[in-house]
Image (cartoon, rainbow, N blue to C red):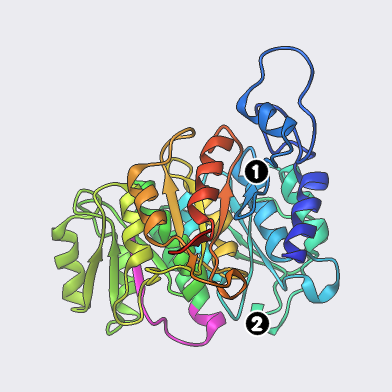
Amino acid sequence: MGLVAIAVAFLVAAVLGGGGSKSTGLSPGASAPAGGGATAAQTAANLGYPSFATDNTTRIGGSDPAASAAGAALATYPSTTPSLRPAAVTLVAEDDWPGGIAASVLMAAPVKAPLLISARGDTPSPTSSALAALDPGGSSATGGAQAFAIGEVATPANLAKVTRIDAGQAAATAAAIERLRDRLFGTAPEHVVIASSEQPGFAMPAAAWAARSGDPVLFAGRDDLPTATLSALKLHPTTPVYVLGPASAISSGVMRRIAKVDSRVHRVSGPNPVTNAIVLARYAEGGFGWDVNDPGHGFVIARSDSPLDAAAAAPLSASGTWGPLLLTDNAARLPSALRGYLLNVEPGYTTDPTRAFYNHVWVIGDEGAIDVNQQAEIDNLAALTKIGGHP
């Protein structure tokens, strides 16, 4: 956790400027301002309860996806020495969540390019700060590129070697990223994920899985299998296809159309985004799925209505404590399905806690997204508990 501490400290000082808590502007360990009614965050700060980290959680507290992406990239690559820097980064537009989710595959080995958020006019301040620290230099694994730019996003002048991927409709962008993935990886994917281009909450968990596995993400509508997606599937007609989300997001008719190209098509789904993410976290079939059904894992939790946060946080699922993306749909309340899942995988020990397996949870977003009370509940659910006997 030493490198993570460095990265989070850098994030607070250089990227977020101490603004990890939107409601208070407090950095960890700061005192609440005098006067006025104390918010939960202010009370917690007065008690010394950190708003960025607890025993079992670490918050990447960006007030927007650009800040969260900068924090996740720096947590993954502290960049205090050249060996701790990435060879390349991926830049995606702040309004292009499908491009961000599809581009998360570039975080997988051998490329391992964390994603940052840019814009079509200028580079956001958190991204510029992170790029200055990350200082990507390119490598043979990246084809010499220091950055992969998805669409016409701004890139700093010091990034001399930039590979641009045309961005348009979600399906076309994802298909272009798959072709880049195939060229850089030099191997066919083990699986292909089809996600919803219309309901982002159901697509979000695909980002973490793509970063972990190297499986590309393609897009379909509820009743539409775009030509670009169909063409991309034909590149790997014997590769198993996994459709993420229920029939209300991607219909059975679309699945039948996919099956005409590749008969090995499966659905992985829950009825809502929160449950859908849990199903993928639990799923295991043919090497696909996280198979996280026991203690001793990392997790990432983000808001289901902030799809670009899924891409921003993807590096955390491909390094460190490697774990699935889970979703909450409320700033103040942990969904019952998520609470039940975390309880089910809660770590425990019988005699010696130093020999136990531990869970760690990354919390993505400021307190407007996930408040300190919900973070405290997550911390408690991830805590190591003595099983049997006396505490």
Residue at 56% over, 70% down? 318
Image quarter of residue 189: bottom left
Q: Which residue lies furthest to the right in this view?
A: 81
Disc 2 marks which amino acid? Ala
Q: Which residue matches tag 2?
A: 141
Left or right of residue 229: residue 14: right
Q: Which contiguous range is marked in magenta? A: 182-195
Disc 1 marks which amino acid? Gly
Q: Can residue 262 be seen in this view?
A: yes
Between the C-alphas of marks 2 and 1, the distance is 31 Å
Check the image and report above or below for 367 versus 33: below
Depth check, front residue: 142 or 362: 362
Residue 14 falls within the magenta-colored stretch: no
Residue 210: percent from left, percent from top: 46, 68
Residue at 39% over, 48% down? 339
Q: Residue furthest bottom?
A: 187
Check the image and report above or below for 362 versus 237: above
Q: Is residue 119 visible?
A: no
Residue 73: percent from left, percent from top: 68, 59
Of label 2 and label 1, which has the lower sequence position?
A: 1
Quadrant in which the N terminus appears: bottom right
Depth check, front residue: 233 or 132: 132
Q: Which residue matches tag 1?
A: 61
